[in-house]
Structures are given as structure tokens and as C-alpha cells.
Image: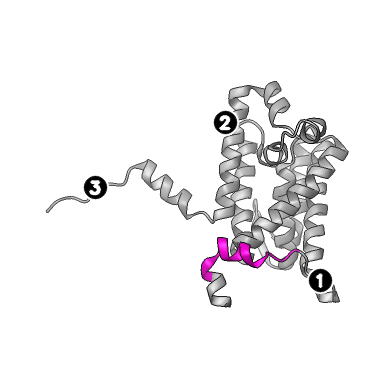
């Protein structure tokens, strides 16, 4: 009989890429594009074109800047690889738990809040802060669940701080700032989405129906 053709590595990679949840896939794609642009442009020109420059963003209408500031994780390195893995891992977990449309609302709020804090603290890029905010929301949802981190088993709520501690050990005290901002912006989302409604407030961060119908048609028809 005829031997079945072996799948090419490219086909295999594309299948795995397509299997990633939509919002996480979009974010990872933006990270890849921003990294490629950073390599082509070089470090100095990359900072100028991709970084969040408030003057150029507001007065020059360079509206891509908050998106590239959230997507650029630095030049390819071991640190870049770890950050991309965390983005995939925590982004997928968050999207799987709360849905694609809610993940879009989460990302919009995080990019909005972190753009403001980045301008305030002079941070041209805040991709690491977005990753920490994802992890913080997840850890608040199941704080006492035990998870593996490096060689330790720790409660989930400690993970954002463990990640911050490992970066501080490698990069000094300044490396803590992106994580602190990520925890604060993530907590702002978590409070208004999950805590405030339980106290009688309005859930103003709920994904609108048209977004659910567009991004999650199966979920919309099940809820109809």
C-alpha cells in the first residue's frame, strides 16, 4: 500500500499556530511582527518608531504606538523567549476561562491603563506589564491553587511576585517597575470586573453582545 505522507514541519507549525485561541494568537502575531521590525530597524530606530512617544502619538496621530509598545518584548533572547512563553501560557488560560470577547476587553483596558502609566513613568514599552497583569488576574481568580514555578510548588497568588523577584535578581531594582504597574493595572481590571459587581456596582467591563456574536458565535447562540 501507499505510505502516508509525513507532515512537513511548516504544516505542523501552522496547525499549532491556528489552534491557539484567537486573541492570544493575534497578540503573539503582533509580538512577532514588532520583534521582526525591531531587528530590521536596529535598537535605536526601533525605539524611535515602535516606542510609546506621547507627543508623536497625540499630535502626530501615530496611533500604532500603544499597540507596538504593548507588543515589543525586546530583541530575540532567552528573556524574550520566556516572555513570549508566559504570554502564550497566561493569555491562553485567561481566554479559555473568560472567552475571546472578554479577553479583547481585558487587552483594551490594559493597553489603555498601561499607556497612561508608561507616559507617566517614561516607559516606552510595556509588554512585560501586560503579561504580569494577565498573571495577576489569573492568580486572583484561584489564589490558593498550587502551581509549579521553576523548581518550587507555590500558591498561584505568589506567581506575579516570583516573576518580579527573578527579574530584579537579574536586572536590578528598576526591573520591578513593569511588574508593579502590571499588578496595579491587572488589579484595576479585576476589581471592576469581579469585585465591584458583587458589591452592587455595575459590571461596565462586560463584553457587549455584538462583540460576543462576532467573536464567539457558538457561545452567543447557546445563550440565546
Towards the viewer: 164 or 102: 102
The relative height of residue 31 versus residue 15 in the rendered view (above or below) is above
Residue 135 position in % (x across, y down): 70, 55
Q: Are marks 1 and 2 in contact (CB under 8 Å)?
A: no
Nearer the camera: disc 3 or disc 1: 1
Determine if residue 77 is in view. no
Residue 165 spot, x, y in % from top left: 78, 46
Of label 3 and label 2, which has the lower sequence position? 3
SS class, disc 3: loop
Is most of the magenta stretch helix, strand or loop?
helix
Is 97 magenta? The answer is: no
For the C terminus, give its image quadrant: bottom right
Residue picked out by circle 3: 5
Using the numbered discs, state the Cα–Cα distance from disc 3 to disc 1 in whole angstroms: 56 Å
Mark 1 or mark 2: whose residue is earlier in sequence: 2
Mark carried by residue 202? 1
Q: On the image, numbered disc 2 is attached to which residue?
A: 36
Mark earlier in primary sequence (3, 1) = 3
> Residue at (55%, 50%) from the top-left corner?
25
Circle 1: is it few (<14), some (14-19), or many (20+) Cα within 10 Å?
few
Q: In the displayed structure, does residue 146 sit left or right of residue 4?
A: right
Report, in whole angstroms, how far the alpha carbon at label 1 lies from the one at label 2: 42 Å
| Residue 90 against residue 216 in the figure, above or below | above
Toward the viewer: 84 or 199?
199
- Residue 98 x, y percent position in the rendering: 64, 65
Q: Residue at x 71, y 52 (%)?
A: 108
Q: Which residues are magenta?
A: 205-218
Label 3, label 2: how many angstroms apart (C-alpha)? 33 Å
Amino acid at each position: 500500500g501507499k505510505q502516508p505522507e509525513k507532515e512537513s514541519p511548516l504544516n505542523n507549525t501552522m496547525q499549532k499556530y491556528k489552534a491557539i485561541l484567537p486573541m492570544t494568537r493575534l497578540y503573539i502575531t503582533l509580538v512577532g511582527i514588532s520583534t521582526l521590525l525591531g531587528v530590521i530597524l536596529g535598537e535605536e530606530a526601533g525605539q524611535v518608531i515602535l516606542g510609546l512617544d506621547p507627543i508623536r502619538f497625540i499630535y502626530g496621530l501615530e496611533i500604532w504606538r500603544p499597540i507596538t509598545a504593548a507588543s515589543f518584548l525586546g530583541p530575540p533572547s532567552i528573556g524574550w523567549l520566556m516572555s513570549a512563553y508566559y504570554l502564550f501560557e497566561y493569555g491562553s488560560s485567561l481566554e479559555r476561562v473568560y472567552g475571546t470577547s472578554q479577553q479583547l476587553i481585558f487587552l483594551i483596558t490594559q493597553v489603555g491603563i498601561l499607556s497612561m502609566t508608561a507616559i507617566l513613568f517614561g516607559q516606552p514599552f510595556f509588554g512585560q506589564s501586560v503579561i504580569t497583569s494577565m498573571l495577576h488576574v489569573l492568580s486572583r481568580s484561584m489564589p490558593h491553587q498550587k502551581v509549579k514555578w521553576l523548581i518550587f510548588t507555590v500558591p498561584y497568588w505568589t506567581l506575579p511576585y516570583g516573576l518580579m523577584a527573578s527579574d530584579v535578581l537579574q536586572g536590578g531594582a528598576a526591573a520591578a517597575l513593569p511588574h508593579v504597574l502590571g499588578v496595579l493595572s491587572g488589579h484595576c481590571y479585576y476589581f471592576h470586573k469581579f469585585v465591584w459587581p458583587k458589591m452592587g456596582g455595575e459590571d461596565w467591563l462586560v463584553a457587549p453582545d455584538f462583540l460576543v456574536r462576532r467573536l464567539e458565535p457558538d457561545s452567543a447562540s447557546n445563550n440565546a
